[in-house]
Amino acid sequence: MQISLRLDGDCVRAFHVTLLERLAALDDVELSVDVRPAVGGIPRSAAALFQLETTIHGLSHDGLAKRVPLSTLAPYKTQSPAAPDLVVDLCGDVRLEGTRTWRVTYNGTSGEAALLALILAGRTPLARIEENGVAIAAGRLGTEYGGIALASFQDMLARTASLIIAAMSGAARSVPDLPEPAQAGSPPMPSAGKLGIRAGKALARRIVQKIYHLCYNAPHWKVGWRQTGGHDLFNLRAHPASGWQELPDDGSRFYADPFPILYQGQLTLFVEDYIHRLGKAIISAVPFGPAGPLGRPEPVLELPYHLSYPFVFERDGEVWMVPESCANGTVDLYRATAFPGGWVKEATLLSGVVVSDATLVEHGGAWWLFATVRDGGGAFSDALHLWSAPDFRGPWTPHPKNPVLIDIASARPAGRMVRRGNDLLRPVQDCRRSYGAALGIARISHLDLIGMEQVVETILNPGALWSGRKLHTLNEAGGFEFIDGSAIAPRWKQRTRD
């Protein structure tokens, strides 16, 4: 297939080189590049904002937004064939009768300026690959760096590349509707003066952040728990009127990612146990009685790298765990030899991939592994990949339509999936405002080797009944239900725990 990539020759970025490399890696593809100048690019005044953010936030100078010389495209033909099989149009100005053209848009508008304008307006861009006005792939783009324009821009450029590659295989065909009004179209690009004001605000915000981090442990998460009385959040679709009790911590650490399990009549809660002075987490566990926790969480699994999201489950009379270990580039399976401790690694399920929050479920006669993947850089939370296996020990095979979903509002797992009658319900993280800001409940309407579809039915936010500023995990067992969210922990109240 002959593919022509249309880009603005006045502003060639590392993003374009990366996209060309990924396209070139596809089978039976011959590439050319259309590098004519284009109108409607990002104004030069934005470079000052990018430069200031690079300095005050310590960003890399070699990110995807970096401008590179036109000569960087030398390995690719810069003269398009007379009749390419497909044109991938990043500028929105290709008009070729009889030629297939994929137009890349952000909230309906083409070009980098449209993407940056959405970022500066605090909006979540809906990216679409359109052919003859019909979307053949779509994704809600996200970032973990809300408020930093350059970092957000680069994350979303990375995921734009993912979306284009996904369209080549028929993946990421749509995003689920959300239970709230849709966003309007793209806002206008701010003037040079307003960009300068934003640069000043970015510096002021960074100073405030530095002061805040001197005074407080940030982030600091809290685990909430309650007895369900037979009515959990999957039924209520709202915070319980009774509110939540908090799992106490000593201020020198926080607890997050609560995963309970009822094993041999005893309810045990596993958590991410993050020690602020070490800057990494271990996995700890605490037993629960009828009135709540029996003591404090005690370490059960510690490795040289950060661990979180202790996905625990019982199978074959034993307890197994798949903790998140994306810092190691693996997804590993552990077995408890002296529950709740004595964990030994039984298998590496996946390797060489940056995977977040691996979540397993049995469905349709197979095991499925759901996780978000940092595909080619970009955000950790907006690209959902699936794997299937005949057994939870593997071997695991990637889904042929990966990524099955690109959506910062509903891709990342937020706990175990549960069944309600014939429905398979999936807790998801809504990270549009920021990482882990809200919790969604999605119903999986289709799951097989053809693809995965889900309907987001509910979005729960923190509020009066859960005072944390965020809400991003939901699990239950033994008549208890657990959530988590961020809180404020002053540094001067720390008490060191050995």
Image: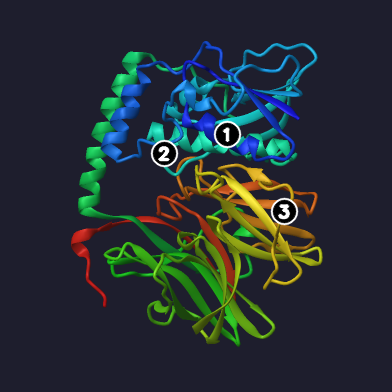
- Identify the residue at horizontal 23%, vertical 45% (top origin): 210
Across and down, in percent, residue 488 comes to: 31, 55
Marks 3, 2: nearer the viewer: 3
Q: Nearer the viewer, residue 464 or 37?
A: 37
Question: Residue 197 lies in what quarter of the image?
Answer: top left
Tag 2: Cα neighbours inside 10 Å, few (<14), some, or many (≥20)? some
Across and down, in percent, residue 33 comes to: 61, 22
Question: Residue 365 lies in what quarter of the image?
Answer: bottom right
Residue at mark 3: 399
Q: Which quarter of the rendered picture does the N terminus lie within?
A: top right
- Identify the residue at horizontal 77%, vertical 17% (top origin): 99
The image's mark for residue 146 is 2
Instruction: Tell me the CA gap for discs 3 and 1.
Output: 22 Å
**Which residue type carries mark 2?**
Gly
- Tell me the element at label 2: loop
Q: Compare marks 3 and 1 and give the one earlier in the sequence.
A: 1
Position above or below: 485 against 115: below
Instruction: Tell me the CA gap for discs 1 and 2.
Output: 24 Å
Q: Compare marks 3 and 2 and give the one earlier in the sequence.
A: 2
Q: Nearer the viewer, residue 55 or 66?
A: 66
Across and down, in percent, residue 218 comes to: 31, 54
Residue at mark 1: 19
